[in-house]
Amino acid sequence: MLEFHWQAILILLPFAGAAGCFLWPQRAVPLGLFVASGIVICVIGAGWQLAELGTQRYAVGGWGAPLGIDLYTDGLSLLMLAVTALAGLGISIYSSGYFSHERARYFWPLWMFLWTALNALFLSADIFNLYVTLELLGLAAVALVALAGGADALSGAMRYLLVSLLGSLAYLLGVALLYHGFGSVDIAILAQRVEPSPVVWAAAGLMSAGLLLKTALFPLHFWLPPAHASAPAPVSALLSALVVKASFYILARLWLEIFPFAGPGPALLMGLLGAAAVLWGGVQALRQTRLKMLIAYSTVAQTGYLFLAFPLASVTGWTAALYMLLSHAAAKTAMFMAAGNILYFGGHDRIADLDRIVQRLPLTITAFALAGVSIMGLPPSGGFIAKWMLLEAAIRSGQWWWVGILIVGGLLSAAWAFKVIGYAFTRSEAPHDTRKIPVVMEWSALLMAMLAILLGLFAPWPLALMEIGSPFDREGSG
Amino acid sequence: MSWSATLPLLVLASSLLPGLVIFFLPEERVATRTILNLSGAVLKLVLVGVMIRGVYHGYHYETSLALLPGLDLVLRADPLSLLFVVLSSVLWLVTTVYAIGYLEGSPNRSRFFGFFSLCVTATIGVALAGNLITFLLFYELLTLATYPLIVHRGTEEARRAGRTYLFYTVGGGALLLIGTVWLYAIANTLEFTARGFLSGLDDTCHPALVIIFVLLIAGLGVKAALIPLHGWLPQAMIAPAPVSALLHAVAVVKAGAFGIMRVIHDVYGIQFAAGLGVLLPLAVVAAATIIYGSMRALFQDDLKRRLAFSTVSQVSYIVLGTAVAGPVATIGGLIHLVHQGVMKITLFFCAGNLAETLGIHKISEMNGVGQRMPWTMAAFTIGAFGMIGVPPLAGFVSKWYLGLGALDAGQEWVVYVLAGSGLLNAAYFLPILYAAWFKPPAASWPSESSSGRCETAWTLLVPPMVTAVLTLGMGLLASAPFSLLEWARFITSLEYAP
């Protein structure tokens, strides 16, 4: 089993699932759940293989780079695969209760297809494949946003489509420049060949700009809140937890491996934009009157934290940011699920009228509160571990200004989270029209939130896993 | 897993597990909930007893879990932590009995007792924390677990108090976090060590260590209600009486004061901190808090608010004792940690009884209440005399050691502060006692509820009686073998080794 090609299965399984769900819509739910569990097992297998044998490279069809397509796994890609598998399993279980039959027949094939694109993206060893998977991912995501129907969803989806295409296009231009300059698209080969030159700088700028747009880094975040808030709850969850993280992953790969010579200037710029995102997203979240918009703005803020990895790269910045990514994925999935439950149960998500709903959904508000604890970075939670590591990195490298950003960002999150949680304790007598909620929806939200909390108690494992193949050490050696 | 590693976990679990189960209990399962609550509390006491016996015989109880590479979550029983553990677990049992009686028939009791148990779990965690990051973790957990109790009644006023509480405590937690990370970056360890772990550091670190000290004390001072960080405490009075007892005596302010003690004893070391010159300013802040709290208490007509300002003042005795660098004063601070808890919880229980039985909330309504509720008021009187520092009650012993310690350390001014505060305490407690015992009762009480044969329900009456007897006993038997004072001397001897 140790020699088994788990990577190939990780792509083929959801792809087969997508086809199956499309062909047999009546069987879509059990099929989807089967595939989701299968992927979790495959990721465990891949992780075991990685821990035993080190990084893995698999040439599809026996044609290696530069001619064929390579699949490459190291600690970083494994982490992303694991995040996707865990959040994906939770989202699949949640969706099995959420969608009506009519919507389910569209949701499942698209979701499986999106999962295929995600897994392929995290396994890609060359920048052109990254482009292809990124494009597939964008298309699947846009279709899922439009799934809610209605004018809001359609305009959100349309805007998302345009942004997504623009971002991929900029990235593709960068790929073309690099291929023209160095004759390869393989990351490992480029890492050896690329030297600083105006063309390389242009490529780096184009690729980064495109990816920043797709990651929704401030000030390029304008498209995210409407798209994420108007989508159905499971879709919002997978967009916030997984899709924006995919473009961040590509950015991390590029900067760590191909452009490690970029130096402190661009890194500082990234950090400053991230800091602005933390503050702006936090303030905007506090100002929202609709719960889903609030959570969407919080994603803008939390994405900002990830970019603090760039200026803090010389210390433990990358591991800290990736731990943030991991715990945010769990917490944000739980939060969107909780918001989905509230919408499903009470028919609206106006924050000022939440009291009548949340008091009758104790499990849901507990999920929201636990996820909130992780997002505001209070212990014990994954968010706390990540924040501690970022703070430590900032202090050890003498970059004090990031400390202020981290603390203020946490306080802003605490402010909006408690604003919502406070409604659980008011007394409201007014009756409310409600719709009975499937048990799986409440429990999957709670379990995802508990995962975010547990990540605060078992941090050494994921941290050790990420380091396999030391993806973060190439900084400075290039 | 060995017994010595399991015991600290069991002590935590004895309140955590009942709490988690209670969350899922339907509202009407009163008997199950009561049994869970009480058996958890009794079990915890038994386990703590075993632990004390073990520590006395030289066993080492410690359990740890890797939190981050190089940083562990450590629970450890040392003499100082046991002091706080004993206080919390004894008072938890008493408060649980009281809360069961107090909340009889009110809504959302499962939620209440669930968070109540979480709160005590967090407090025990604070007490047993073996390093600063573990302390921080449970300290923040305590904030989170207390919030639902403060807003329990769900009125607009309660929610406002909850918001104020969070505003102060989350802000304080952030300061504590910065201080802790910074300290770790400098010292590369956070392990509590008798006489501190910082004295070996290079002199160039000292300015940073002073700033870190300020950050840590500010973060802890929020919960210990040092001025100007005390604003949340009087507002939180809106919560039900058992919660006030919990805030003032068992958990929250105590966690703050205990944290200050930990930082000075086991992070900086008393002598090193005195050398840095940070203890005198802290003593001045504590003295100012003592006087300010008493002054404010003087002008409150609401009984619980008067008691709240009295807490602001009394908790700073603990801080003052710790900040006056001398072994005798340290003993005074340590024993006042326990004494203040026992005395203040008596007063709050009594205030709760008056409110619950007769609807009395204001001091101006208390005329002649001693005739209607003699037992309650007798307990109140003992508590109040203890606070004033009348011998032979517990409060006297604390003040004696604090005063003596200050003279010992050559800081006479502290004695004047203590004397002034004693006078102020008398000025705000004696009129209450006079009104209750000697003024003629009003024609009718604000809202009297029938209460059976005794003056009120026995679950409400027994807890204050027990704590009043404890107040008396801890004063009378202060020098007996195995007493609190002995234990405090033992702790102090560890901190001031030659």
Image (cartoon, coloured by chain):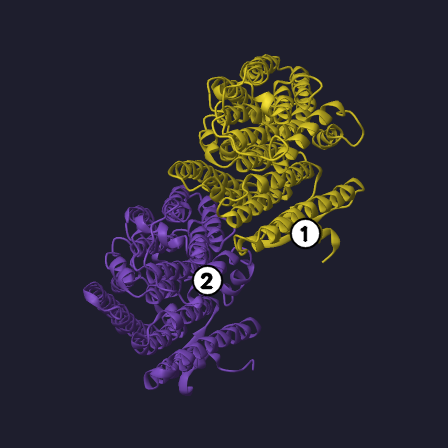
Chain colours: A purple, B yellow
Q: In the rendered structure, which amino acid carries the disc numbered 2?
A: Met
Q: In the rendered structure, which amino acid carries the disc numbered 1?
A: Leu
Residue A185 point in image, percent of width and height: 33, 74
State whether residue A204 appears in this view. no
Q: Where is the C terminus of chain A found, in terms of image quarters?
A: bottom left
| Above or below A6: residue A353 | above
Chain of the residue under the numbered disc 2 shown in the image? A
Q: In the drawing, does residue A193 fall left or right of residue B144?
A: left
User: Residue B497 occupies which quadrant of the picture?
Assistant: top right
Residue situated in front as seen by the camera: B487 or B74: B487
State whether residue A292 appears in this view. yes
How many numbered marks does the figure carry? 2
Q: Disc 1 designates what residue? A: B10
| Secondary structure under the numbered disc 2 in the rendered image | helix
Q: Residues within 10 Å of mark 1 (few under 14, many from 20)?
A: some
User: Residue B272 occupies which quadrant of the picture?
Assistant: top right
Q: Disc 2 designates what residue? A: A448
Q: CA distance from mark 2 to mark 1?
A: 27 Å
Chain of the residue under the numbered disc 1 shown in the image? B
